[in-house]
Structure formats: structure tokens, C-alpha cells
Amino acid sequence: MAIAVDQDQQWLLNCLSATLDPNQEVRCYAEASLNQASLQPGFGSALSKIAANKELVVGLRQISLSELMAPAVLLKQFVKKHWHKGEESFEPPVVSGDEKAVIRRILLLALDDSHKKIRTAISMAVASIAAYDWPEFWPDLLPFLLRLINDQTNLNGVHGAMRCLALLSADLDDKMVQTWIPALFPCLLTIVASPQIYDTYIRTKALSIVYSCISVLGTMSGVYKTETNAVIVPMLKPWMDQFSSILKVPVQSENPDDWSMKMEILKCLNQFIQNFSSLIGNEFEVILGPLWNTFVSSLRVYERSSIEGTEDSYEGSYDSDGAEKSLDSFVIQLFELLLTIVGNARLGKAVVANVKELVYHTISFLQMTEQQVHTWSVDANQFIADEDDTTYSCRTSGVLLLEEVVNSCGGEGVLAIIDAAKQHFIESQSKKEADNTSWWRIREATLFALSSLSEQLFEAEELGSVASSLQNLVGPIFSEDSQIDPCEYPFLYARIFSSVSKFSSVINGGVLEHFLHAAMKAITMDVPPPIKVGACRALSQLLPEANTDIIQPQMLNLFSSITELLNQASDETLHMVLETLQAAIKAGHQLSASVEPIISPVILNVWALHISDPFISIDALEVLEAIKSVPGCIHPLVSRILPYVGPILNKPQEQPDGLVAGSLDLVTMLLKNAPGDVVKAIHDVCFVSITRIVLQSDDHSEIQNSTECLAACISGGREEVLAWGSDSGSTMRSLLDIASRLLDPKLESSGSLFVGSYILQLILHLPSQMAIYIRDLAAALVRRMQSAQIAALRSSLLVVFARLVHMSAPNVGQFIDLLISLPAEGHDNSFAYVMSEWTKQQGEIQGAYQIKVTTSALALLLTSRHEELSKIHVPGHLVKSGGGITTRSKAKSAPDQCVMLPLPTKILALLADALAEIQEQVLDGDDQDSDWEEIKDDIENDKEFLYSASADSSGRPTSEYLEAMAKVFNEDQEDHYEDDLLSVADPLNQINLANFLADFFANFYQSDRQLFDHICQSLTQSQRNAIQMVLQR
């Protein structure tokens, strides 16, 4: 479409040309002129006319549309800035309606430009305008594009329209897609089914549009099931037939266009199955055969292209639109589709019949590629990074598919994996005997698959037979491969090392001992990097369980070699080496003490050099903690560290970022569980400096870490801390000043995060000194809680209140009176505020110690029968404002509200919830992963079982049952949120919460039956059931 160039357009052309001038001044002047011109009416239409004028030089036309070609005001930017007032990027003036119509018309007519880059740029401009104008103000857009893609005589127009439709389809909403699909999909099907007319690029682009539309329909299907089904059902058979016809053609070698088109089909199928598996029904059978053909033929291509490297795999290749077109990306998409099918309850059954073949071929895909062999041989860091990468690779995707096979097929899937591994082992052995140099690849892939699935294999339902099968499988492999030359097959040997540690429980003791010695030896030898990596990983897992007598003779050499590795390690390998050293120190026992003078300085240096790297510095700290735990090492270690950290803490302002906070962490580690003389030595050097940091620093990390450090110091030194200073009164004032600053509402919540633990140490270990400050402390706690922006901080302060309740027993009423006498902003008094927060936060409190203290404190409060309890009402359960889907506007106009409950009722409900949670943990046992549907089906049986298990012949809960409840509770909580200082120091941690709650409910029931029954009327049925289980039936 030729357009005459008027005077204004010629000026615009000159400016555009000047933006390419090598002279910076000329370029800047041109850009400024264009920016000024963009504010004038007609600029956008002039820019469009230039872009659409086919007689102009391509470079000048393209520069007017492509942001990448010039920093001037371009059409796409022009649309963003001046098209719609509601945009954040809008700048006046807004384009007039007449000019918008001109721009839209010109751009559509230019979509068939003969230059691909121009077509793409115009398509992007059309898409950006359509985001604002279609369909309301641009109703002829879709009809025009459909006419264009149906015109087989104008393939440039088809290209332009398809590019435009692809961009538009990525931003469809639920209303648009229902308009698009009936009109668009028949046209797209014609294109995909006509390879003699349309090239692979256009057919692939058509499939990508199908994928986008099906994805939108999938998101709609949950709410608009009837509407989406009506759209989907008519298209299923024609599209499945077309997919089938394309997939039944074997995957072609060195043909990335073929891979890209088939990959779009796989993506479409994935969406169909994920969202419409109930509709796909019989049509799915049409796909199975061609899909399996694609899977098998792609393996042959993958073996030649990627594994053997004899053909081009186009790794890292992208098409002109930026989409990846490598063989790897195609295989990953294939795995993703197969994973979806296997995991689908309706369609997965079709795979189960061929699960052995599926697993066998999948393991073949896991072989190392020639590129990986080359890269990993020269770069150990990349080897470690790729081994740890669980995101995007053929090996990772293949393992995920195998995991889904185990999860979905159960024992049959496990046996399929074991059978496939055996078959691969036999075939690799035959290749080895035939002097095939690549025999090791499938052996390594088999071990990689088995070790990646080790947890699932051991957890399989038929554990006895599976364990036996595993032993029969891995035993011969390890025995056979123990004889190979590590340097000749470094990757296989490295995989053996890491696999041995995963299957140590089913490996013959002699074989295990052989590889343990081999790993310890490999660390000391000049062997390829992958072997040392594998040896480190094996030692990290095997040393903790190793026989001391066997490993002791080699430990000194091992320590020496690991220390040398530390000096050579890069940032990527340090984590692994430190982990190995930590395992060696723990396994070395007394021998570790003899090498402390050598190892400690090296680790301290690593820690100091990487203080800004939280992962490495924590690893180094854990190694030092392991050294500290070795008998006889803590004193020399402390004497080595204190001269270093003392000056750092004394002059914190002069230190590099992170060093002060890291040093405080180091000191805290030394203080925990340290003998009294060590605590005093650290106190003498660091106490004054640490208190100064808490009181003066503005760095939240420093404040947090110094708070933890002081808490550890008080925990270790107890009342003696006051005597260690020159003036006990001065020390106590410092401790109180610290509490005052940490509880100051003006301090940001992050800085106060660990104040709860600190105050608990004060009241636990300095009770007589703190007693006179309880009123002031309670008032400060309330102020800090009311200003806290972090829920974890509020929870920690509630634990302090709970501990104060315990300390006030048996006179809990006096503590309630104290809180009543304290004001609280927005509430009648502090007791009303604290209980409002406490009842709201109780369910969010984490950690066995914290839950024990707060739960039992609530029981004490209720037991006090204080008259104030019944006067306070707190939020109970939510009441929905209405039925149906809750939209944003609906939520604003009619927000959900809570039922207000009397405080005694809420407390009893929380105690019942705590009891129910423990009972549920006992019931769940090993069935934590069972589906909710199964739980619903069996819930009544479970209740009867629990009743029978929890009661003796008199109907009372048995001691065995309550102990089981306590055990499950502790195990469930002990791995998270635990404060070891408190759990060790506070006798309340010895509470058996199950026993405590059972006794509480029994006593309450017996002492005040009327009140008990009255409160229970307001509880839910599940809460009443929980209580009934521990009462006489």
C-alpha cells in the first residue's frame, strides 16, 4: 500500500533518519524533536502512514514501530502514552477519535507487508491498540483478520494476521474467547490441516493460538462449566483427529520446525486433559497410538542428537518470535504431557497397561548428553549447579514423570521401575562386554533414576517385597561397578557414590564399606572433579552412620584433604565441602579434637570471607558448632574466636556490612549449652559491647542478633550474670534498658522481633529482680503489641503474657486484676485487649513449647473463674454475608463478620481445638497423604476407633492413649519454630499437653457441671466430640 508523503511526513522521515546518525548531538536533537511532535494532533497517523508506506526504505519504516531500533517516540510508545486516559503511563493529550480510526485502518491494511519484521511490528501495534479498543470500538478487527487468514492467495497477509491473532490471544478474557472460538477455530483447523499450502511457521502459530484459547477456557470451566462445555465439545473430534495425523508421523531429525509444531500440539493436549478430561473420553483413544509413536521416535532422535551428539539438537535455538525450538524443550513438553496423563484418574488407566515400557524409555531419556559430559568434565561448579537444579531439564522432567508413575500406579509403578532398571543393567552389561564405550551412560541414568526416587521406593506400600527387590537390584550393580576405573568412567563412579548413600540400608555391609573407603580415598587423590563431588556427597550421608573402628584410621588424611579442598573451593562448591567436613567432624569424635587447631582457623576464614552470603556463612557456622560439640574443643575454639570478635563488637561502626550481625550469631552459637566458665569468658569480653549495640544500633539485623545473644548469655549465666559485672545494679539496669528499647513502640517491629525470648529469659532466670517491674513490664508489652506490624512479634509477646500467667498461679486472679488496671488504646483495659489478641492469634502460634505454655495458660485463666472473664466478648467464627461467589465489590459492600462470643466460651473452644488437633494427629498416623474423599468416607469408623482406643473399660482415657497423643504432638512440632533456650530452661516444657487438657476438662466437668454444659452449647460439634473423647462416655 503506497501512501503519498506530504511535507509533515517528510519532516518526520528526516527526524527518524537522524535518530540513526552516528553523531550523538544529532541523534539527541532528533529524539527531542520527535518527543515534542508526539504532542501534536496527527502525529500518530503520520507515524502509521510511514510505517505502512511500502515504497520507503525498510529501516526507516521499521524504526517508527520498533522500540529496539531507536529511543525516539515510536508508535507503540505513542499508543501507551496517549491512547487511553486510564493508563498509568498516560500523558496528555489523548488521541482524538478520528485519528484513532485512521491509525486503526492504516495498520490493518499494512498487515500483509512483504517484510517479516515490518509485519511483526505492525502486529504488535495492532495488538496494543486492541487492548483498549476491541471489541467495543473496533468491531471489524476480528472479521478483517479472519478474511486475511482465509485468503490463500495472500500468504503475507496470513502471516501478519496470524502474528496479530497470536498476540491478541495471549490477552483474551472469558467473554472474548467465547466470541473468538466458534469463528476462529474452523479457520485455524484449515490452516493446520493444509501443509501443502501453509508453511510450518504459520501452522505452528495457529496451534499456539489454539493453546491460548483452550487455556482461557480452562480457567473459565470451574465457574462457567456449561458454557465452556458447549464451546469445547464440537471441536474435540476434528482437532483430536488432526493432532493424531500430525503426531503419527515420526519425529524428524535435525528439524526444529517439526519439533516446534509438535510441541504446540503437546501443549494443547495438556490443556485439554488438565481441564476437560471428562469430555475428551473416546477421542483420547485416537491420540494414544500417535502419542506413543512420538514418544518412541523422539527417543531415537534424542539419542542421536543429544546423547551421542552425532546430529544437531539445536540447543539454545529460538525462532523469530523468541520461542525456544530445541529438541530439549520438545522432550520436556512431552514429559509434561505424559505426567498429566499418568496423574489423571480418568485417562491414566490407559497408561498403566504399558507402564513398564513407559518407564523403560523414560530412563533412556535420562542419559547424560554429550554437551553435559563436555561441560561437566571441565567445570565442576556447573556440574554441581545442574545436579542441584530441579527446574528445567530433561533429566529433571523425566524424574518427575517417574515420580508420578509411583504416586499414581503404586506398587505396580514401583515394580515397573525396578524391572526397567534391571533390564537396563543387563543391556548395559552386554554393551560393556562388547566393548561399547557408551555402556556407562545408561547405567548412570538408571542409578540417577533410582536414587532420585529412593524415598518413594522405600515408602511404597509393599515395602517388604520392594525392599527385597531393591536389594537384589542395586546390590549386583554396586558390586559389579566397584571394579571399574574411576578415572575412566568418572560420571558413573560419581553417581555410584551418591547412590550408595541413598540405598545404604539395603546394601551388603562389605560393599558399603568398600565405597566408604573409596570415597574417603577419592577425596585425597587427584581424580576428575565429578568423582570428588560424588565422594563428598557420599561421605556427607555415610559418615554419620559409619562404624567408628573402620573409619578412624583414615580420618586424619580425610581432614587434611577436605581442608585442602576448602582452600580450592569456589563459592558454588563450598556448601558441599563444608557439609562433608561437618559430617567428618561428627564422625571423627576424639580425633576431631586433635585437628581443631588446623580446621578452626580455616573455617573462621571461610566464614569471614563469605559473611555476606547467608548460605555459606551459615554452613561455616554449623561446622564450627560441630567442632564446639566435640569433647575438649569448646575452650580452645572460644579462645580462638574471642580475640577476633571482641574488637568487631567493640567498634561496630567501623566494620563492613554484615560482619557485626554475623559475629553476634557466632557468639550466640558459642553461648548455647556452654559450660559456665565459657559463658563467663564470653561475657567478660562481649557483654558490654553487645548491650551497647542493642541500645544504639539502627541496623535491625544487629538488634535482632544481639537480642538473641543476650538471651543466650542470660540462659547460660543465669543469676550469676549480675555478679560478673563490676556492679550488679548497673548490669540489671542495662538489661532493663534493653527491654525498654526493644518494647518501645517507636522501634520498627523487625528490630523487636526477638524481644519475647529475651524477656522470657529475664523472668525465668532473674525472677526476684524482675518481680518488682511486672506492672511496668506488662504495660510496655501491651504498648509494643498494639504497635507491632509483624504477627510473629505479637505471638511472641503473647507467650510472655502466658508465662506471666503461670508465674502468678495459684493467684491468677491477681494478674488479671493487674491487667485490668492498665489502660489500652481502643479497649476498656489491657486485659480485654490482650485476650482479644490472644484468642485471635492462638491458632497461629507455632512451636511445641510456645503452644504448651499458651494453651495451658488459657486453661489457668478459665480455671480462675474471674468475674471479668464473662464481661469480655471476643470474635468467634466467621459468618458469611451471603451465598454465591464473593466478588471484590460484594466483599466491600457486605464484608464477612464474626460472631462475638463470651471469653470463657472462646477459651474453651480453643482448648477443644488444641485437643482435637492432637487427636487428629494420632488418627492420621501414617495416612497424612490420604485424599480428603477417603477421609470423609472413613471418618465415622475413625471416630469409633479413636473412642475405643482412647478409653478403658470404664470409659476413661487410657494413659497409653494420652502418651501417644503427647508423643505425636511433640514430634509434629519439634522441627519448627522451636526456641531451644526456652525448651531446655523452662520446666513448663515438660508438660504433657494431652494429659494436661484431659485433666483440665475432667476437673472442669466435675467441679462446675452447670457452667461446663452451658459453655459447651456454644461449641461446634467437632469441638464437643473432642472433649467427649477424654470424658467418661
Image: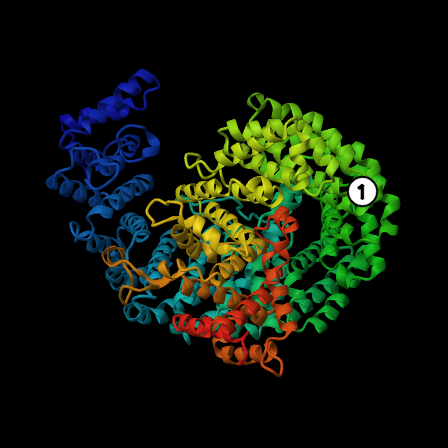
- Label 1: which secondary element: loop
Q: Nearer the viewer, residue 86 or 258?
A: 86
Say whether residue 308 is left or right of residue 150. Answer: right
Point out residue 933 in the picture as x, y percentages from the top left corner. 47, 74
Eyeballing the image, is 518 above or below 863? above
Q: Residue at x 34, y 16 (%)?
A: 23
Point out residue 645 in the picture as x, y percentages from the top left corner. 66, 27
Quadrant where the N terminus is found in the figure: top left
Res. 145 in view: yes
Q: Nearer the viewer, residue 148 or 889?
A: 889
What amino acid type is highlighted by mark number 1? Pro
Say whether residue 331 is left or right of residue 1021. Answer: right
Q: Nearer the viewer, residue 286 or 629?
A: 629
Res. 930 in view: no
Eyeballing the image, is 803 above or below 80? below
Q: Which residue is mark 1?
A: 631
Point out residue 713 in the picture as x, y percentages from the top left corner. 64, 37
Q: Determine crowd level at label 1: few under 14, some 14-19, many 20+ residues with C-alpha closer than 10 A.
A: few
Q: Residue at x 71, y 33 (%)?
A: 680
Q: Residue at x 69, y 26 (%)?
A: 644
Q: Residue at x 60, y 39 (%)?
A: 711
